[in-house]
Amino acid sequence: MEHEFHDLEYLNYIGGKWVPAKSGEWMESIEPATGQVIGRVPKSGPEDVAAAVEAAKQAFDSWRLTPAPKRGEILFRVAQLLEERKEKLARFMAVEMGKVLPEARGDVQEAIDMAYYMAGEGRRLFGKTVHSELPNKSCWAERAPVGVVGVITPWNFPIAIPSWKILPALICGNTVVFKPASDTPMLGAEFVKIFEEAGLPPGVLNLVTGPGSSVGNAIVEHPDVKVISFTGSTESGRQVATIAAAQLKKVALEMGGKNAIIVMDDANQNLALEAVIWSAFGTTGQRCTACSRLILHRAIKDEFTERLVEATRALKLGHGLDPETDVGPVINAAALRKIHSYTAVAQQEGAAILVGGRIWENGGGFFYEPTLFDNVQPHFRVAQEEIFGPCLSIITADSLEEAIRINNSVAYGLSSSLFTQDVNRAFQAIRDFSTGLVYINHGTIGAETHLPFGGTNDTGNGTREAAWTALDTFSEWKAVYVDWSGRLQRAQIDTHEQ
C-alpha cells in the first residue's frame, strides 16, 4: 500500500539537540505489513546513554524547582499538540507498528487523555497533613521528585505507553532518558518532538534509540538513573529488576498476561461474542491485556463456539491503513515464528485447530491468521504461556467456581472478564479474581487513564501505572515536622512520661 511514510531519518535528542549516535551507526525501521525498510535511526550505545543521563542530571535542579503548575502548563500544551497531530501520528503508527487505523487513533487518544490528566496533577500533587502528638507543632507529608528516570517501552503501544511513564515522571519534577522499542523508534522520536515544541526545557526529556542489549541495559545500569520504568516481557523484566536491585533503584515493571474471558450460561451471548473477538484479535492479539483464554460454561459451549468460529473466519487481514482491514500484521518475523510454533504445541497437546493456525502469505509482511484452539485443558502450554499473537484457547467449565479457579491458575495476573446477567455472580467474581483488572460484561481490554493499571504475580512487581498511583513510582514521600513551641519536644518521650 502506498503511503507518505518512507525514506525517513531521525536522530537522538540529548540536551535539547538532535544528534546522531557517537559511533555513527544506524539501524533500520521495518514496516511489518510489507517487510520493507521505511527509515533509519541511530544505533546508539552506552556512550550515548551516558550523554543523555548527564544532560538529564544537569537539567534536574532547574526542572524540580519549576512550580508544578507551570510544569503542568507545558504538559497541557503537549496534550493540545497531540490532538492536532492525532491523525498523522495514527497513520504513522499503522505503518511503523501495524495497527489498524481506528486502534492507532485510540493509542494516540490515550496519550492525549494522559497528558490532560497529568497536566491537571500540576495543581494537585496532594500531600497529607496530620495533627502532631505535641503542642505547637505542625506535621505533613509532601511529594518530592527522585531524579533521573529511565523509561524503556515496548512496540505495541508506541505512543500510549511512553505517555503513561514520561508524563507522570515530568509532572513530579523528574528528568527522563527515554528508550523506545527497536521496532518503533521513529514514533518515539515523533512523540519527543511534541514535548520540544510544547516548550519543555532542554535536557528534561532525552531520547536514545538502539538495541535493548546496549541502550536498555546501559540505562538500567547507570548509577545516576534513580528510577526505572519498564514495560515488556516477564523474562526481560526479571533481568531489569535483578540489575537494578544491586543499586537499590526504584523499579516499576509492567509485563505479561494470560487473560481470560468467562462466559456463563446466562450471558448476553451477542455482547460476549463481540467482546471476545475484540479482546482476542484486536491489535492482532499483541496486547498484555489481550484475551488468550476463553472459558465457556458447558451449557452454552457448543453454540457459542460455533458462532465464534464463524465470526473469526470473517475477519479480514491486511494493512492497517486499509479501512477494510480487521486484523493487521504481527510486529516482525521473529514474532511470526514464535506464534506459529504454538500451533504445533497445541496439536501435540491434543487441542483441535478450529480456525487459522497458518501464516498468511501476502508477499512480504508478517501476518498470522486469527486462530482458535478447542478442547484445551487448563494445564496445556497454550493455556499457560503468553503467545502474544492472534491465538485463543477455548476451555470448558461446569460452574462459576471452576471457571474462577481456571482463570486464576496461570502465572500472570493482569486482566479478567466475566459475562453474566446475575449480579451475585458478578460480585463473587470481582471478589475472587486474582488480577489487577476486572471487567464485568466487557472484554479484557479497554483501561482508562484515571484508574490504576497493572497486575499481580508475574505481570508486575506491585506498582501501578496511570491515575494517581503512577505518581508513587516517580516521587518520594518527604515527612516534614515544624516545631514552633520554642522548646525541645521529644516525640514518644515527652508525651508519655509519667
Image (tube, grey):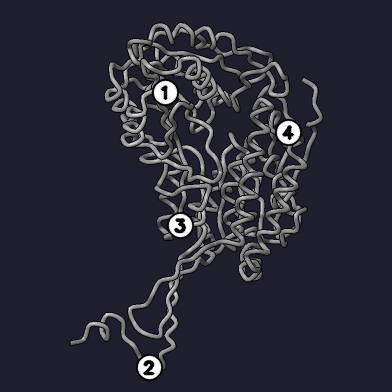
Q: Residue at x 38, y 10 (%)?
A: 301
Above or below residue 388? Residue 191 is: below
- Find residue 281 and report its horizontal and vertical position in percent: 54, 21
Circle nearer the N terminus (4, 1): 4
Label 4 to label 1: alpha-carbon separation: 36 Å
**Which residue is identified by label 1?**
419
Q: Compare residues 215 and 459 and report the one nearer the observer.
A: 459
Disc assigned to residue 487: 2
Classify mark 2: helix, strand or loop: loop
Classify mark 3: helix, strand or loop: strand
| Pointer 4 local density, CA inside 10 Å: few below 14, some 14–19, many at least 20 | many
Q: Nearer the viewer, mark 1 or mark 3?
A: 1
Classify mark 1: helix, strand or loop: strand
- Find residue 401 and report its horizontal and vertical position in percent: 27, 25
Disc assigned to residue 250: 3
Circle nearer the N terminus (3, 4): 4
